[in-house]
């Protein structure tokens, strides 16, 4: 049922989205963002290194104990299954890379590391940035750390913790955030709590990316409320993710953009 709903939502997205060139978008800032971040397709050499790590994870059939934060239970899963289900697909992860690259973001927070694919994309985008990424499952965190070490990404700081319990105490130690990627618990209440907690530590021009805004009715409700938040100016809905701009110079406006 959830799957049928998501397919239906995707068709609605295709019908309501701005055309792929961004024509009809009046804000020069958002137009430039669409052209330079969403429309650009040329690969950077680091993409191949990160995708090689993904391929290795997809081929790894060893089993690990996974702590499920939805149910609080442990279960066994293969690394390949996690890589298939949890990780951002290349096109979306590359948008994260381009946001960090284009805006030269310095202080980045990710909620939900998994095997570290999206963290590695963000960290590879700017030599001067620091990525703090939070993951609860110890076995998954260990694999992510191995992946960061393999690519020599020393400016990623992985914290193995329960985000629900530790986000508030970690945030004051990181400083003002200019990019926040929320990809942990895909439910209404935790997502809204994470978003609102991070807002208090965000730079006035910070950008948030919220993953899977059409994943469920709850996620859609959270996305609607995030758009209404007074601190939120423009947003771009690219279906798989919602991009949120706090920049006070922008007019409050919500864009739907087709990127494939
Ligand atoms: C969708 S995956 C992240 C994928 C990753 N961002 C990527 O694209 O490469 C979500 C991760 O969030 C973690 N997670 C969910 N709820 C959490 C919580 N309350 N505390 C810590 N980690 C949590 C899960 O263990 C899972 O590994």
Image (cartoon, helix red, strand yellow):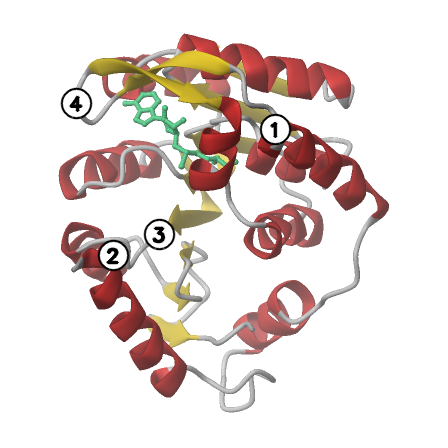
Residue to which mark 4 is pinned: 71
Residue to which mark 2 is pinned: 223
Say above or below: 129 vs 207: above
> Which residue occupies 55% across, 54% down?
92
Camera-nearest label, 2 or 1: 1
CA separation in Å, label 2 and label 4:
23 Å
Camera-nearest label, 2 or 4: 4
CA separation in Å, label 4 and label 1:
25 Å
Residue to which mark 3 is pinned: 212
Q: Earlier in the sequence, mark 3 or mark 1?
A: 1
Q: Secondary structure at mark 2?
A: helix
Q: Earlier in the sequence, mark 2 or mark 4?
A: 4
> Taking the image as drawn, is residue 114 in sight?
yes
CA separation in Å, label 2 and label 1:
31 Å
Give the percent coordinates (x, y) of residue 179: 51, 41
- Report if the beta carbon of the residue with label 3 is closer than 8 angstroms to ligand 1: yes
Residue to which mark 1 is pinned: 57
């Amino acid at each position: 049922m959830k799957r049928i709903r998501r397919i239906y939502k995707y068709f609605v997205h295709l019908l309501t989205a701005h055309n792929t060139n961004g024509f009809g978008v009046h804000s020069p800032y958002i137009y430039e963002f669409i052209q330079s971040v969403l429309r650009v397709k040329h690969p950077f050499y680091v993409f191949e290194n990160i995708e090689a790590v993904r391929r290795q994870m997809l081929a790894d059939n060893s089993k690990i104990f996974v702590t499920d934060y939805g149910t609080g239970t442990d279960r066994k899963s293969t690394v390949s299954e996690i890589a298939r289900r949890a990780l951002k697909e290349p096109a979306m992860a590359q948008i994260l890379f381009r946001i960090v690259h284009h805006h030269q973001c310095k202080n980045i927070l990710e909620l939900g590391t998994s095997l570290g694919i999206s963290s590695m994309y963000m960290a590879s985008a700017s030599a001067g940035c620091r990525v703090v990424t939070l993951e609860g499952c110890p076995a998954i965190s260990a694999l992510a750390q191995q992946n960061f070490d393999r690519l020599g990404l020393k400016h990623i700081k992985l914290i193995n913790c329960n985000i629900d319990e530790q986000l508030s105490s970690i945030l004051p130690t990181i400083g003002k955030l200019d990019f926040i990627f929320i990809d942990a618990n895909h439910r209404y209440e935790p997502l809204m709590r994470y978003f609102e907690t991070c807002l208090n530590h965000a730079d006035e021009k910070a950008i948030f990316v919220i993953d899977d805004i059409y994943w469920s009715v709850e996620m859609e409700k959270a996305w609607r409320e995030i758009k209404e938040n007074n601190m939120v100016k423009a947003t771009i809905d690219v279906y798989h993710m919602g991009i949120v701009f706090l920049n006070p110079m922008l007019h409050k406006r919500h864009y739907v953009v087709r990127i494939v």
